[in-house]
Amino acid sequence: MNENLFASFIAPTILGLPAAVLIILFPPLLIPTSKYLINNRLITTQQWLIKLTSKQMMTMHNTKGRTWSLMLVSLIIFIATTNLLGLLPHSFTPTTQLSMNLAMAIPLWAGAVIVGFRSKIKNALAHFLPQGTPTPLIPMLVIIETISLLIQPMALAVRLTANITAGHLLMHLIGSATLAMSTINLPSTLIIFTILILLTILEIAVTLIQAYVFTLLVSLYLHDNT
């Protein structure tokens, strides 16, 4: 009970060296691969999910946008596996770090914007000034649209960080309450423990949904610029 509430969000170290890089590289090792002509059920299910996700995100894109399909599928798999591993006891979730999420959001957003300015610069510049804008409002609208464009990667990173952090904090609080009530009132402990199980199931869904939302928004930014 005396444990710091935010202790699980501190980046771990091994012999004084940061271990975040090793943790980030660990999830891809969990993705099974097959060396045989006929895949087992796990590999088949994995490939079906990847094809389903890729088809849903790439349907709205043109040929140039579909060249990003491998990157977007890799992104959603990485975020989903990292979030799920973070639900394990005594584990560290890199996606609770705003710096980590910004490091993913800014390059992807910048790449989509650069593609837009290179391929169709007129349409990209047209977003800064909606058609039919009164002349006195032009400077203000250009500033507002510029700010809204620059804030997109921050919104991506903050959304993912806030949702994952909030779920972990709530699970930590309810878990601590369950442990404290176990020596006081057994019926109340069972009720709180049931709530904890339901919250864990909800958090599993949230981790997968947030991975999908992050990747889908990047895909939408790309669609607007291709």
Image (spheres, grey):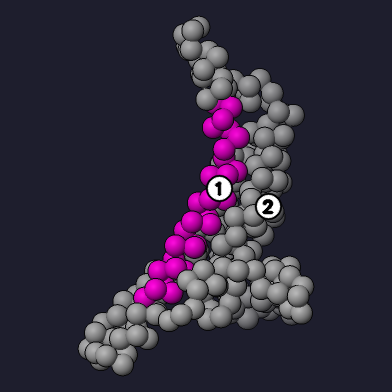
Instruction: Give 148 or 188, whichever is nearer the viewer.
Output: 188
Q: Quadrant of residue 150?
A: top right
* 168 is within the stretch colored magenta: yes
Q: Which residue is the site of mark 1?
A: 156
Instruction: Give 224 or 172, whichever is nearer the viewer.
Output: 172
Give the residue displayed 66% in from the left and 45% down from the top.
106
In the displayed structure image, the side of residue 127 where residue 120 appears, left or right:
right
Local secondary structure at mark 1: helix
Badge 2 amino acid: Ala
x, y percent for residue 20: 70, 69
Question: Magenta segment range?
Answer: 145-174
| Name of the residue lying farthest toward the top | 135
Local packing at callout 2 (Cα closer than 10 Å; few below 14, some 14-19, many 20+) is few
x, y percent for residue 119: 72, 29
Q: Which residue is the site of mark 2?
A: 103
Main secondary-structure element of the magenta-colored stretch: helix
The mark that comes first in sequence, 2 or 1, is: 2
Give the residue displayed 58% in from the left and 77% down from the top.
91
Q: Quadrant of residue 92?
A: bottom right
